[in-house]
Image (cartoon, grey):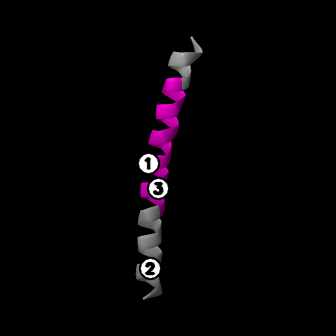
Amino acid sequence: MSKEILEISVMVDEKFDVSFNLVNGFFGFILKVFGK
């Protein structure tokens, strides 16, 4: 039981990390464009 919950939380963490990196990269790109 607890092992399954741990696996699910790890999956969610990885998905969150990926989406967070995408958002960071996206805003970094916008800042670069408007920074020029």
Q: Which of the image's four quarters has the N terminus?
A: bottom left
Residue 25 position, x and y percent, is 49, 34
Query: Which residue is labeled 3 in the image?
Result: 16
- First along the sequence among labels 3 and 2: 2
What residue is at 50 percent from the left and 17 percent from the top? 33
Q: Which of the image's four quarters has the C terminus?
A: top right
5 in the magenta segment? no
Element on which disc 2 rests? helix
Residue 9 position, x and y percent, is 47, 70
Query: Which residue is labeled 1 in the image?
Result: 19
What residue is at 48 percent from the left and 40 percent from the top? 23
Per the model, the C-alpha gap separating discs 2 and 1 is 21 Å
Query: Which residue is labeled 2 in the image?
Result: 5
Numbered range of the magenta stretch:
13-30
Per the model, the C-alpha gap separating discs 1 and 3 is 5 Å
In the depicted structure, whether residue 36 falls above or below residue 26: above
Residue 22 position, x and y percent, is 44, 40
Per the model, the C-alpha gap separating discs 3 and 2 is 16 Å
Find out whether the residues at labels 1 and 3 contact each other: C-beta distance under 8 Å.
yes
What residue is at 44 percent from the left and 48 percent from the top? 19
